[in-house]
Amino acid sequence: MIAIGFGVTFAAYTIGMLGFCWIRGYDVTFTDLFKQTWPGVQVNTTAPSGGHKLGTINGSQNVT
């Protein structure tokens, strides 16, 4: 009985996650939800970023 409860809970969570992705407009298939890693966001490196390179934090200092 507990195994059935776990299965129903997992199925509801998976379908809810898929519905959320579809509503938000993400290009995710049902099988993508079960992959261990998801593809990263494609970033345009020529996009303006306020004078800073992408990935830097304002006021940070690099220590080597």
Image (cartoon, helix red, strand yellow):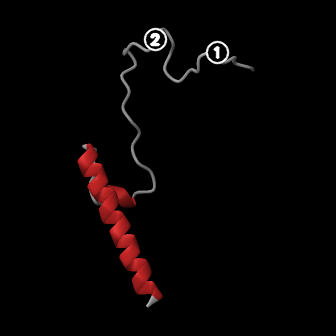
Residue 30 position (above or below residue 38): below
Q: Residue at x 32, y 61 (%)?
A: 16
Q: Residue at x 69, y 17 (%)?
A: 61
Q: Residue at x 45, y 56 (%)?
A: 36
Q: Amino acid at mark 2?
A: Gly
User: How far across and how far down the image is residue 55, in percent?
Assistant: 53, 24
Q: Is residue 22 left or right of residue 60?
A: left
User: How far across and how far down the image is residue 5, in percent?
Assistant: 42, 82
Q: Amino acid at mark 1?
A: Gly
Residue 51 versus residue 20: which sits nearer the camera? 20
Dot label at residue 50: 2
Label 1: how many Cα within 10 Å (few below 14, some 14–19, many 20+) = few
Image quadrant in which the N terminus is located: bottom left
- The residue beneath circle 1 is 59
Q: Are marks 2 and 1 in contact (CB under 8 Å)?
A: no
Q: Is residue 8 left or right of residue 24?
A: right
Q: Is residue 27 left or right of residue 4?
A: left
Residue 64 versus residue 12: which sits nearer the camera? 12
SS at mark 1 in the image: loop
User: How far across and how far down the image is residue 46, in percent?
Assistant: 37, 14
Label 2: how many Cα within 10 Å (few below 14, some 14–19, many 20+) = few
Dot label at residue 44: none
Q: Which corner quadrant of the image does residue 30 belong to?
A: bottom left
Point out the tag, 2 or 1, that comes first from the N-terminus: 2
Q: Which corner quadrant of the image does residue 44 belong to?
A: top left
Taking the view exactly as shown, the residue that stands out farthest to the bottom is 1
Image quadrant in which the C terminus is located: top right
Residue 57 versus residue 53: which sits nearer the camera? 57
